[in-house]
Amino acid sequence: MRFLHAADLHIDSPLRGLDARDAPVERLRGATRRAFVALIDLAVRRQVNLVILAGDLYDGDWIDFRTGLFVHEQLARLAVHGISVFVVRGNHDAESIISRQLPRQAHVHVFSSRVAQTHVMGDLGVAVHGRSFPDRAVTEDLVPGYPAPVRGCFNIGILHTSLAGSPDHGTYAPTRLDRLVATGYDYLALGHIHARQVVRELAPRIVFPGNLQGRHAHEIGPKGCEIVTVEDGQITQTEFVALDVVRWHALVIACQSLVDIDALCLRFTAALDDALVGDRQRLHVVRVRLEGESPLHRLEASQPGVLEAALQAALRQREGPEVWIERVLTQLQSPLDRAAAAERPDAVGEVVRLVDQLVGDDAALQRWALAALDAVPVLPADLGDARPERLTPDAWRALLADAEAMVLAQLGAGLPDVQPADTSR
């Protein structure tokens, strides 16, 4: 017996970044659907007996029936091959959220939201247990209500849960590892946490497969599903299969030794080649972060956007997998002999002395920055939705360092390149 375990498909979820310049909009917008098609293809190709979907099949209520019809059509392909589907609803597609309905499919079993249920497939020797979310906010532990394991069967429990909690996800149907173990099941198919996690290897095996398709820059790396093979009531093989059609990457470039954009581009393309290792099957979306002390900071300050433009140009000259740069974050520092600069009687010295004073007092920095923002009648477009009062001290210091570099680039061309400001206080 072989089954496929997936979760958090979020079909037709609006991927972030579609309004960015040169975004491959159609490739991104259709990613969740194409990943789901790949999952159905895999289930047929690998001749699985069961497909388990552990919550959040949908991202929310359907805008129209086309979302439901697409899923209905894909699941119908499994019926032709005798593959059963077991579904629990999660916080995004809870029973109270999905308002539209289509005819039921005999091979698709959606668990009740009122009470945990058990489906026994005697020919396969499998018992599947699960319960759906009635509403988006399920705060109680659902595990105590799950049925006892069926003797003589391989028991699978399906649960959408935050488990003990995650900083990246809301708390829904929280439970403890010891309670999952105490169910007596052989496999716990979990959903809700979008990063793949094997919570427990065996007795029972407990797995978050992660979401099927990364949707933004914080959902990086391979995304897919688990395939589990069972023989004589025992797990004999487990396999993670990547199915994402768009893969997100976080690329950090250390710029300490880089003095010009040619050196930056060489390091960027080398890091990109290492990250992609020849994967031509999918679109790769990259968020780049430039770090360290480098003259590149002053170059960016004097010519805003030059570093991103350089990386875009380098990307267009390389061969290999399709790549789109979603954003370039510059967390650089300019080389500067602060002690010498602070002694200068001109505007350069005044700027350095003010920055040194502000970085040592978080409250003073925030007051000064908010007062400066109040003096600006209209914020730039890319700052229009910012909430300055919610910025952390680290964020204010980073912004101050960028502002200092920009001002010094205008005032102090030819400043000696030595030590940067200490903004870690």
Image (tube, grey):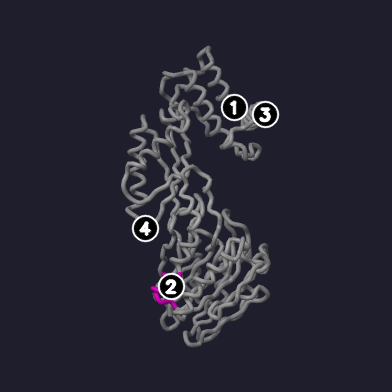
Which amino acid type is shown beneath numbered disc 1? Leu
Residue interval drawn in magenta: 40-48
Identify the disc placed on residue 281.
Answer: 4
Across and down, in percent, residue 256 comes to: 39, 33
- Give me the residue at 62% from left, 32% from top: 379
Kindly identify the amino acid type of the residue bearing the numbered disc 3.
Answer: Asp
Residue 419 shown in magenta: no
- Characterize the magenta stretch by its predominant secondary structure: helix
Q: Earlier in the sequence, mark 4 or mark 2?
A: 2
Q: Residue 397, percent across and down?
A: 56, 33
- The CA distance from mark 4 to mark 3 is 49 Å
Q: Quadrant of the N terminus?
A: bottom left
Which residue is tagged 2? 43
In the displayed structure, 381 sits above or below 405; it is: below
Q: Are marks 1 and 4 in contact (CB under 8 Å)?
A: no
Name the disc covering residue 374, or none. Answer: 3
Which residue is at 46% across, 66% downward?
37
Circle 4: element type: loop
